[in-house]
Amino acid sequence: MSRRFDLKAVLANLAVVLLVVVVLFPLVWMVSVSFMSQGEAATFPPPLWPSKPTLEHYRDLFVTQGMGRYMLNSLILATLATILALLFTVPAGYAFAKLRFAGRDRLFQLLVAALVVPAQIGTLPLFLMLKSMGLVNTYAGALVPWLASIFGLFLVRQYALSIPDEMLEAARVDGATEGQIFRRVVLPTLQPIVVTLALFVFLGSWNDFLWPLIVLTDQSNYTLPVALAAMSREHVQDAEMMMAGAVLTVAPVLILFLALQRYYIRGMLAGSVKG
Amino acid sequence: MTAVEATIAAEPRRPAANPRTRSRAAWGFVAPALIAIAVFFAVPVFAALLLSLTDFDIYALADLRNLRFVGLDNYVNLFSNPLFWGAMKNTGLFALIGVPASIAASLAAALLLNARIIKWRPVWRVAFFAPFVTTLVATAVLWNYLLHTRYGLINWALTGVGLPAVDWLGSPATSIPAILIFVVWKTFGYNMLIFLAVLQTVPDELHEAARIDGARAWTRFRHVTLPAIAPTLLLVSIISVASFFQLFAEPYVMTQGGPAQSTVTVLYFMYEEGFKWWNLGSASAVAFILFLCILAVTLVQLAVARRLGAYE
């Protein structure tokens, strides 16, 4: 490559930078407005930076709006959803890839076909079912859909297909039981996809809205998105406080994503391009 | 069964432990997931079909003896309900404008980032993708404010270049485009990543050869890039249609279905019918119609793709 001034390259790179600024600006501004004092954001022209940065909205959210409780609910639910989803889908995904049992392939075809059915269709009967079990307005009720993730099972299976059979056979010859093989041989090789799946479920549960809105009827059980939606219907004028609430909701998942983005993007492409 | 056991038996270096234990272990691995999928997914989906044939309402919720089988009455009533047709029309509009707009944005961003002259590509890739992982409700609240008629940055930018301010979420004519601007901003990174991954599999030599033959940018895109990404384009459009048919949180947070019912989507209609008015029978019928619509559009897309492929 020559080092001469290449106008086309400069323009293309400039276009990308400009686009990135446009895309990221709303998020940056959200943070900026959350530090503005009461009413500052409701002026024209809209100010870009707070004249006197303040933390009062964050304090208000925790002191008067019960934000701590909602954060705790979101954190507990997302953590439990992640653990449960891994417990249910990782062994199953491995078994569908590597263990032989009667009807395996037909069952798997059935599951893949079921991927086209949106889970929303069963929302109403599921609600009635949980109601009769007394699980409406409980953590358990909110967690139930995460147990039945066909997508997670599919993701683990695709990855587990690459485990060499010789490795498993060698362990069997050594007299290891199937459970020991899974724990000592299979799980370490599945580690990248386990991280990916954990990340998907954690972010999915944290960001989920329709199901928690339906099943968590009591305010003390609200997750962050449900609480934020309820607040936005009451505090429409109070832009600074709403932005602070949005920052508290978005920041944890955004940071988590940035820290583990390699796993996220690799898993996403494995799930869609090959699938 | 015997065939499966025979294959296992024929395998080299078979351990002393018999294949039946292994098959039992396999069932132990898959049983929890399969039971969960059956109980919490398959049963509710089939139950929804049955529920849609009943008049399940708030009285049945209190006492199941009030439940009656009504055949296709729920469907008949929905088809004569202008609010339902409004929701269908709005959802259709969302998909009709939203799918091409979001695919165009994704593809444009992917093509731009794929150019060899772009530096620090991984950084920009993550930046474009970041809105996708943010919490929908939180960014909907943010965009409510960005789109604010008086104090919003978008109108400030418009008036800054001499254009009139727009009452984005307050007028039925602009409420759908306003929500779509937000949705495209939030989701274009997802399809962009998929396109980018496929574009990187197109060999540079192909572009180079076309360039040497004197093909212009558009011709190269049409004859080199497009055929290479065609299968992905189909996949992405199918996924996009399904997701635009299922918009719910956006109108719930930004407009509450208004103004003048202009942003009531099918899923929003289902939510209100089911959990506001407790007409669970009718709401299940809505859910089923939505599913059939998604399925129908998917099949049409597949048929069109097959025909286009056949003519080439």
Image (cartoon, coloured by chain):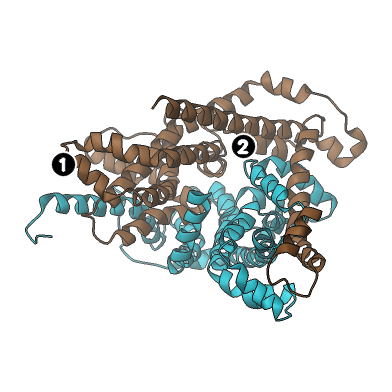
Chain colours: A cyan, B brown
> Can residue B149 be seen?
no
Residue B247 pos. (x, y %):
55, 40
Q: In the picture shown, does residue A15 fall above or below B215?
A: below
Q: In terms of depth relative to the viewer, which is nearer, B79 or B5?
A: B5
Which of the 4 quarters of the picture holds residue B184?
A: top left
Residue underneath mark 2: B267
Residue B11 pos. (x, y %):
69, 65
- Identify which amino acid the numbered label 2 is placed on: Leu
Q: In the picture shown, does residue A146 fall above or below B143?
A: below
Secondary structure, mark 1, is helix
Kindly identify which numbered label has been placed on residue A213: none
Q: Is residue B254 left or right of residue A9?
A: right
Outermost residue to the top: B80
Q: Nearer the viewer, mark 1 or mark 2?
A: 1
Q: Chain under label 2?
A: B
Kindly identify which numbered label has been placed on residue B212: 1
Q: Is residue B300 left or right of residue A187?
A: left
Q: In the picture shown, does residue A49 fall above or below A103?
A: below
- Identify which amino acid the numbered label 1 is placed on: Ile
Residue B74 pos. (x, y %):
75, 25
Residue B278 pos. (x, y %):
75, 37
Q: What residue do we see at 27% from left, 43% from top?
A: B157
Please state, as top left, top right, bottom left or bottom right, where the N terminus of chain A lies in the image: bottom left
Q: Is residue B63 left or right of residue A49?
A: right
Q: Is residue A6 left or right of residue A112?
A: left
Which of the 4 quarters of the picture holds residue B290?
A: top right
